Image: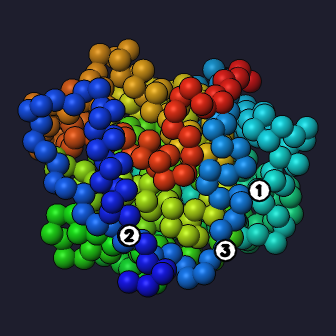
Amino acid sequence: MDRRTFVKAGCIGSASLLMQGLDPMMRADVPPRPEVPPIELRGLPDYKPSPLGMPGLFPGRVIEVRDPNAIARNRVSQPVVRQMLEHAMKELTVEKSVQAAWAKFVEPHDIVGIKINPSGAPACCTSPEILREIIGSVQSVGVPAHNIVVYDRYSYEMDIGSYQVLLPPGVRITGIQDAFVDSSSYDPNVYCAANFFGEWETRSYMASIVAQLVTKIINVPTMKDHSASGVTGSLKNLAYGTFNNVARSHRAPFSFTNPLIGLMCTVEPLRSKAVLHIMDGMRQVWHGGPLTQVQQFIDQPGVLLAATDPVALDTIELEAIEKKRVERGAPSLWQHDPNSITTNSDDFYHDASKNLFFRQPGHIAAAGKLGLGVADLKQIDHRSLVA
């Protein structure tokens, strides 16, 4: 192992134990999760970290903007979203103009990647209306359309979301891979390696579009729960949307999304290039994520959140989904009750008391321990605004 190879096995184990200690629903009769194996991380050799990288310019600051008119009968209002985004960006950066706010993160010479989340389309995916506003804002600081790349891991999910026909002309819309086994668009020199369950392929490679092409990333996750990681937020959208071969991290009923999600986000150049996170909370999936199409588990709160700190942002998201589950009489995301586990996906999608894995929402706090942001609610500057 040379100096460019980083193994965090020791801190991973202690972080995992810490998360279990914080778990308010841990039960003695839960079968123990297999021990976290050594995890090897390899980034781009001699890559110079950027001060804009996670946790970014404003650690611990999360701006939340709400507007009841942002979404009605499942339709997102473009004018309302524009006002919400402008309000959020000025509040986040303490700039008087929207253009000055965006200029803190991107420059005219940048190739800007916009990482979306089409998973769960059409019921809940990154809203084209928000994407159009982000694209327009990036162009306002001088980035030409052909240097803007909207991307995600799977082409077929982007096709379902119809992004190709809904976004401005000239913008590149790219699926990293066409099929589950396609690895041609990944950099073989940048990877995360671990043997979780005795799988044959133990490496997950970083997408070449992130490693070699884009210079800045604007991360646009959606607000939803996840059957393995607890929530799909900023961290998971980046990690599992950037590296391939990630489904191997969870095999029912166990999940190694904690600590893998946070560790993947530390790998350069992903850490440095992800400079801004804008969470689409027009819709909120509080059970059945990330793929559910069951409308009874999808609310429409009309929320938009902005931060440079993905840990703080995901902490706020986690609290919001936990609160909603309490309101609806659903078990906590922290619950580790063997009786809740089902192997029948239909049961999971239609019964909020069932799940496929023992969820790992502790991946957020674990990412905070890795220096990616602030996970303590008492230390988060959460500004909730009404547009």
Q: CA distance from mark 1 to mark 3?
A: 17 Å
Instruction: Look at mark 2 in the image and give the residue it sits on.
Output: 7
Q: Earlier in the sequence, mark 1 or mark 2?
A: 2
User: In the figure, 339 relative to 137: above or below?
Assistant: above
Instruction: Look at mark 3 in the image and give the residue it sits on.
Output: 48
Instruction: Look at mark 1 in the image and give the residue it sits on.
Output: 105
Between 331 and 82, the residue placed more toward the observer is 331
**Residue 258 screen position, x and y as percent:** 34, 50
Q: CA distance from mark 1 to mark 2?
A: 31 Å
Between 77 and 39, the residue placed more toward the observer is 39
Label 3 element class: loop
Tag nearer the camera, 1 or 2: 2
Residue in the picture at 87% in, 40% down? 95
Tag nearer the camera, 3 or 2: 2
Amino acid carrying label 2: it is Val
**Residue 306 screen position, x and y as percent:** 66, 40
Label 2 element class: strand
Amino acid carrying label 1: it is Phe
Residue in the picture at 73% in, 55% down? 135
**Residue 355 screen position, x and y as percent:** 21, 37
